[in-house]
Image (spheres, rainbow, N blue to C red):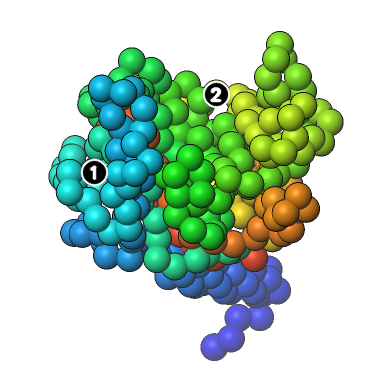
Amino acid sequence: MQSLDPVNNHYMTIRIVLLALLSYLSLSCTQNTSKRESLFNGNDLTGWDTYLGPVYDTLLNNFDTLNVIGLNKDPHHVFSVVQTDGQPAIRVSGENFGGLSTTREFKNYHLTMQFKWGSQRWNPRKDKKRDSGLLYHAVGPHGADYGFWKRSQEFQIQEGDCGDYWGVAGGSFEIPARKQNEEYVYDPTGQLLTFNEANKEVGRRCIKMPDAEKATGKWNTIEVYTLGDTAVHVVNGVVNMILYHSSQLDGGSLTPLKQGKIQLQSEGAEVFYRNILIQPIQEIPATILH
Protein backbone atom coordinates (compact mmCIF):
# COMPACT_ATOMS: atom_id res chain seq x y z
CA MET A 1 0.00 0.00 0.00
CA GLN A 2 1.36 3.45 -0.89
CA SER A 3 2.26 5.55 2.10
CA LEU A 4 0.11 8.62 2.61
CA ASP A 5 2.66 10.16 4.97
CA PRO A 6 3.89 13.35 3.19
CA VAL A 7 7.09 13.42 5.28
CA ASN A 8 8.07 9.90 4.23
CA ASN A 9 7.25 10.66 0.62
CA HIS A 10 9.43 13.77 0.80
CA TYR A 11 12.44 11.86 2.15
CA MET A 12 11.87 9.07 -0.37
CA THR A 13 11.99 11.64 -3.19
CA ILE A 14 15.22 13.12 -1.83
CA ARG A 15 16.73 9.65 -1.56
CA ILE A 16 15.86 8.81 -5.18
CA VAL A 17 17.35 12.10 -6.38
CA LEU A 18 20.56 11.52 -4.39
CA LEU A 19 20.91 7.96 -5.68
CA ALA A 20 20.42 9.17 -9.24
CA LEU A 21 23.04 11.89 -8.71
CA LEU A 22 25.54 9.43 -7.26
CA SER A 23 24.92 7.06 -10.15
CA TYR A 24 25.52 9.87 -12.64
CA LEU A 25 28.73 10.96 -10.91
CA SER A 26 29.97 7.38 -10.79
CA LEU A 27 29.24 6.92 -14.49
CA SER A 28 30.86 10.25 -15.28
CA CYS A 29 34.03 9.33 -13.39
CA THR A 30 34.13 5.95 -15.12
CA GLN A 31 33.78 7.57 -18.51
CA ASN A 32 36.53 10.11 -17.74
CA THR A 33 38.85 7.41 -16.43
CA SER A 34 38.24 5.29 -19.53
CA LYS A 35 39.64 8.10 -21.67
CA ARG A 36 42.92 8.07 -19.77
CA GLU A 37 45.66 6.39 -21.77
CA SER A 38 49.00 5.00 -20.69
CA LEU A 39 51.86 6.07 -22.95
CA PHE A 40 54.12 3.38 -21.47
CA ASN A 41 53.03 -0.27 -21.73
CA GLY A 42 55.45 -1.47 -19.06
CA ASN A 43 57.17 -3.95 -21.38
CA ASP A 44 58.97 -2.05 -24.13
CA LEU A 45 59.21 1.31 -25.88
CA THR A 46 56.40 0.75 -28.36
CA GLY A 47 54.95 4.13 -29.33
CA TRP A 48 58.24 5.97 -28.80
CA ASP A 49 61.17 7.01 -31.00
CA THR A 50 64.72 7.47 -29.76
CA TYR A 51 67.03 10.18 -30.99
CA LEU A 52 70.63 10.65 -29.87
CA GLY A 53 72.71 13.60 -31.04
CA PRO A 54 76.44 14.31 -31.20
CA VAL A 55 78.66 12.12 -29.02
CA TYR A 56 80.69 13.86 -26.32
CA ASP A 57 84.44 13.67 -26.93
CA THR A 58 86.12 13.38 -23.53
CA LEU A 59 89.56 14.19 -24.99
CA LEU A 60 88.47 17.43 -26.68
CA ASN A 61 85.88 18.17 -23.98
CA ASN A 62 83.31 18.96 -26.62
CA PHE A 63 80.49 17.38 -28.61
CA ASP A 64 81.62 15.88 -31.91
CA THR A 65 79.09 17.22 -34.43
CA LEU A 66 80.44 14.80 -37.05
CA ASN A 67 79.56 11.81 -34.85
CA VAL A 68 75.76 11.89 -34.53
CA ILE A 69 74.03 8.66 -33.46
CA GLY A 70 70.63 9.61 -34.92
CA LEU A 71 67.06 8.32 -35.02
CA ASN A 72 66.14 4.95 -33.48
CA LYS A 73 69.76 3.98 -32.97
CA ASP A 74 70.75 3.35 -29.37
CA PRO A 75 73.99 1.33 -29.19
CA HIS A 76 74.53 2.04 -25.48
CA HIS A 77 70.91 1.39 -24.44
CA VAL A 78 70.41 4.92 -23.18
CA PHE A 79 66.66 4.23 -23.16
CA SER A 80 65.45 0.94 -21.70
CA VAL A 81 62.69 -0.66 -19.66
CA VAL A 82 63.60 -1.89 -16.18
CA GLN A 83 61.98 -2.97 -12.94
CA THR A 84 62.56 -0.57 -10.07
CA ASP A 85 60.77 -0.37 -6.71
CA GLY A 86 58.55 -3.22 -7.82
CA GLN A 87 57.21 -1.53 -10.96
CA PRO A 88 58.25 -1.21 -14.59
CA ALA A 89 59.89 2.09 -15.50
CA ILE A 90 61.65 3.73 -18.39
CA ARG A 91 65.31 4.15 -17.55
CA VAL A 92 67.17 7.01 -19.18
CA SER A 93 70.87 6.47 -18.52
CA GLY A 94 71.96 9.96 -19.63
CA GLU A 95 75.14 8.60 -21.25
CA ASN A 96 74.36 10.22 -24.61
CA PHE A 97 72.34 13.44 -24.99
CA GLY A 98 69.05 13.16 -26.85
CA GLY A 99 65.38 12.41 -26.38
CA LEU A 100 62.70 9.75 -26.26
CA SER A 101 59.65 11.08 -28.10
CA THR A 102 56.14 9.79 -28.71
CA THR A 103 55.36 8.82 -32.28
CA ARG A 104 52.02 10.64 -31.99
CA GLU A 105 51.13 14.27 -31.38
CA PHE A 106 48.73 15.43 -28.66
CA LYS A 107 46.78 18.57 -27.76
CA ASN A 108 44.36 19.63 -25.01
CA TYR A 109 45.34 17.11 -22.36
CA HIS A 110 46.27 16.42 -18.77
CA LEU A 111 49.59 14.58 -18.64
CA THR A 112 50.89 13.01 -15.45
CA MET A 113 53.98 10.92 -14.71
CA GLN A 114 56.44 10.07 -11.98
CA PHE A 115 60.21 10.40 -12.02
CA LYS A 116 63.13 9.82 -9.68
CA TRP A 117 66.85 10.34 -10.07
CA GLY A 118 69.33 7.50 -10.37
CA SER A 119 72.98 7.56 -9.33
CA GLN A 120 74.87 7.70 -12.63
CA ARG A 121 76.10 10.96 -14.17
CA TRP A 122 78.06 11.57 -17.36
CA ASN A 123 80.26 14.20 -18.97
CA PRO A 124 79.92 17.08 -19.53
CA ARG A 125 77.49 17.24 -16.58
CA LYS A 126 79.23 14.70 -14.36
CA ASP A 127 79.78 17.23 -11.56
CA LYS A 128 76.66 19.34 -12.13
CA LYS A 129 73.01 19.14 -11.13
CA ARG A 130 71.19 16.08 -12.41
CA ASP A 131 69.25 17.19 -15.45
CA SER A 132 66.47 15.95 -17.71
CA GLY A 133 63.23 17.47 -18.93
CA LEU A 134 59.69 16.91 -20.14
CA LEU A 135 59.29 18.57 -23.53
CA TYR A 136 55.72 19.09 -24.73
CA HIS A 137 54.30 20.50 -27.98
CA ALA A 138 57.47 19.09 -29.59
CA VAL A 139 57.48 19.73 -33.34
CA GLY A 140 59.79 19.83 -36.32
CA PRO A 141 63.09 18.02 -36.83
CA HIS A 142 65.05 16.18 -34.18
CA GLY A 143 68.17 17.95 -33.01
CA ALA A 144 66.84 21.49 -33.47
CA ASP A 145 68.16 22.53 -30.05
CA TYR A 146 71.95 22.09 -29.67
CA GLY A 147 71.69 19.06 -31.96
CA PHE A 148 69.64 17.03 -29.47
CA TRP A 149 65.98 18.07 -29.03
CA LYS A 150 62.93 19.17 -30.96
CA ARG A 151 61.43 22.65 -30.85
CA SER A 152 59.17 22.50 -27.81
CA GLN A 153 58.05 23.86 -24.45
CA GLU A 154 60.07 22.46 -21.56
CA PHE A 155 58.85 21.47 -18.13
CA GLN A 156 62.28 21.49 -16.52
CA ILE A 157 63.27 18.39 -14.57
CA GLN A 158 66.51 19.29 -12.86
CA GLU A 159 67.62 18.97 -9.26
CA GLY A 160 66.16 21.94 -7.38
CA ASP A 161 64.58 23.42 -10.53
CA CYS A 162 61.71 21.05 -11.21
CA GLY A 163 58.82 22.95 -12.81
CA ASP A 164 60.86 25.76 -14.39
CA TYR A 165 60.03 26.79 -17.95
CA TRP A 166 62.57 26.73 -20.78
CA GLY A 167 61.78 27.61 -24.40
CA VAL A 168 63.47 25.00 -26.59
CA ALA A 169 64.64 25.88 -30.13
CA GLY A 170 62.14 28.70 -30.57
CA GLY A 171 59.43 27.70 -28.09
CA SER A 172 57.81 30.77 -26.52
CA PHE A 173 55.38 31.52 -23.68
CA GLU A 174 54.05 34.61 -21.93
CA ILE A 175 54.38 34.18 -18.16
CA PRO A 176 53.62 36.55 -15.27
CA ALA A 177 56.95 37.03 -13.50
CA ARG A 178 59.13 39.37 -11.45
CA LYS A 179 62.84 39.99 -11.68
CA GLN A 180 64.86 38.64 -8.77
CA ASN A 181 68.55 39.50 -8.95
CA GLU A 182 69.37 38.68 -12.59
CA GLU A 183 66.67 36.01 -13.10
CA TYR A 184 62.91 35.99 -13.59
CA VAL A 185 60.66 34.13 -11.15
CA TYR A 186 57.04 33.14 -11.69
CA ASP A 187 54.63 35.45 -9.88
CA PRO A 188 50.89 35.26 -10.71
CA THR A 189 50.61 38.96 -9.83
CA GLY A 190 53.66 39.94 -11.87
CA GLN A 191 53.99 41.52 -15.29
CA LEU A 192 53.23 39.26 -18.27
CA LEU A 193 56.59 38.75 -19.99
CA THR A 194 57.57 36.92 -23.16
CA PHE A 195 60.11 34.14 -22.64
CA ASN A 196 62.00 32.91 -25.70
CA GLU A 197 65.51 32.84 -27.14
CA ALA A 198 64.95 36.03 -29.16
CA ASN A 199 64.11 38.12 -26.10
CA LYS A 200 67.61 39.02 -24.93
CA GLU A 201 66.31 41.09 -22.01
CA VAL A 202 64.20 38.32 -20.45
CA GLY A 203 65.64 35.14 -21.96
CA ARG A 204 63.94 31.78 -22.30
CA ARG A 205 63.91 30.56 -18.70
CA CYS A 206 61.34 31.33 -16.01
CA ILE A 207 61.90 29.94 -12.52
CA LYS A 208 58.99 28.13 -10.88
CA MET A 209 57.43 29.24 -7.61
CA PRO A 210 57.00 27.61 -5.15
CA ASP A 211 59.44 24.70 -5.00
CA ALA A 212 57.69 21.37 -4.34
CA GLU A 213 60.37 18.89 -5.45
CA LYS A 214 61.24 15.96 -3.18
CA ALA A 215 64.75 14.98 -2.20
CA THR A 216 66.97 13.23 -4.78
CA GLY A 217 66.14 9.54 -5.00
CA LYS A 218 62.45 9.90 -4.13
CA TRP A 219 59.61 9.62 -6.64
CA ASN A 220 58.08 12.90 -7.75
CA THR A 221 54.75 13.31 -9.54
CA ILE A 222 54.64 15.94 -12.26
CA GLU A 223 51.64 17.11 -14.26
CA VAL A 224 51.07 19.31 -17.27
CA TYR A 225 47.70 20.70 -18.27
CA THR A 226 47.49 22.10 -21.79
CA LEU A 227 44.38 23.65 -23.32
CA GLY A 228 44.59 25.82 -26.42
CA ASP A 229 47.57 28.11 -25.85
CA THR A 230 47.55 27.84 -22.03
CA ALA A 231 49.58 25.42 -19.92
CA VAL A 232 50.00 24.68 -16.21
CA HIS A 233 53.00 23.06 -14.46
CA VAL A 234 52.28 21.03 -11.31
CA VAL A 235 54.85 19.32 -9.05
CA ASN A 236 53.67 16.90 -6.36
CA GLY A 237 50.21 18.43 -6.38
CA VAL A 238 51.46 22.03 -6.16
CA VAL A 239 50.81 24.45 -9.04
CA ASN A 240 54.06 26.34 -9.58
CA MET A 241 53.49 28.02 -12.96
CA ILE A 242 50.67 29.03 -15.32
CA LEU A 243 51.82 29.87 -18.85
CA TYR A 244 49.93 31.76 -21.55
CA HIS A 245 49.95 32.20 -25.33
CA SER A 246 52.06 29.22 -26.35
CA SER A 247 53.85 30.04 -29.59
CA GLN A 248 56.99 29.46 -31.61
CA LEU A 249 59.49 31.64 -33.41
CA ASP A 250 59.21 31.33 -37.18
CA GLY A 251 61.46 33.64 -39.15
CA GLY A 252 61.38 36.22 -36.40
CA SER A 253 57.58 36.11 -36.00
CA LEU A 254 55.50 34.24 -33.43
CA THR A 255 53.01 31.63 -34.59
CA PRO A 256 50.75 29.43 -32.41
CA LEU A 257 52.13 26.23 -30.88
CA LYS A 258 49.25 24.26 -29.40
CA GLN A 259 50.10 20.62 -30.02
CA GLY A 260 52.97 18.26 -30.64
CA LYS A 261 54.84 15.22 -29.45
CA ILE A 262 56.01 14.53 -25.91
CA GLN A 263 59.75 14.09 -25.43
CA LEU A 264 61.80 12.97 -22.41
CA GLN A 265 65.36 14.28 -22.33
CA SER A 266 68.59 12.39 -21.82
CA GLU A 267 70.99 15.02 -20.53
CA GLY A 268 73.86 13.51 -18.61
CA ALA A 269 72.00 12.00 -15.64
CA GLU A 270 70.31 8.69 -14.91
CA VAL A 271 66.58 9.13 -14.36
CA PHE A 272 63.56 6.82 -14.20
CA TYR A 273 60.04 7.54 -15.47
CA ARG A 274 56.87 5.56 -14.77
CA ASN A 275 53.04 5.80 -14.74
CA ILE A 276 52.95 8.02 -17.83
CA LEU A 277 49.27 8.80 -18.33
CA ILE A 278 47.48 11.21 -20.66
CA GLN A 279 43.84 12.24 -20.69
CA PRO A 280 42.02 14.56 -23.11
CA ILE A 281 40.43 17.61 -21.46
CA GLN A 282 37.95 20.27 -22.51
CA GLU A 283 38.81 22.62 -19.66
CA ILE A 284 41.45 23.17 -17.01
CA PRO A 285 39.90 22.75 -13.55
CA ALA A 286 39.18 26.07 -11.85
CA THR A 287 40.98 24.84 -8.73
CA ILE A 288 44.15 24.52 -10.82
CA LEU A 289 43.86 27.93 -12.48
CA HIS A 290 43.11 29.74 -9.22
Q: Residue at x 65, y 30 (%)?
A: 206
Q: Amino acid at mark 2?
A: Asp
Residues packed near mark 2 inside 10 Å, few (<14), some (14 to 19) or many (20 plus): some
Q: Residue at x 60, y 36 (%)?
A: 165
**The one of 71 and 180 positioned closer to us in this rendering:** 71
- Whether residue 112 can be seen here: no
Q: Residue at x 33, y 65 (%)?
A: 47
| Element under disc 1 | loop
Q: Is residue 82 left or right of residue 237?
A: left
| Element under disc 2 | loop
Q: Amino acid at mark 1?
A: Val
**Mark 1 to mark 2 CA distance (whole Å):** 29 Å
Q: Position of residue 282 (x, y in %)?
A: 64, 65
Q: Which residue is mark 2?
A: 211
Indicate which disc, 1 or 2, sits on the residue closer to the N terminus: 1
Q: Position of residue 209 (x, y in %)?
A: 63, 26
Q: Residue at x 70, y 15 (%)?
A: 182
Name the quadrant of the C terminus.
Answer: top right
Q: Position of residue 34 (x, y in %)?
A: 42, 70
Q: Is residue 39 left or right of residue 168?
A: left
Residues packed near mark 1 inside 10 Å, few (<14), some (14 to 19) or many (20 plus): many
Q: Position of residue 131 (x, y in %)?
A: 40, 29
Q: Which residue is mark 1?
A: 78
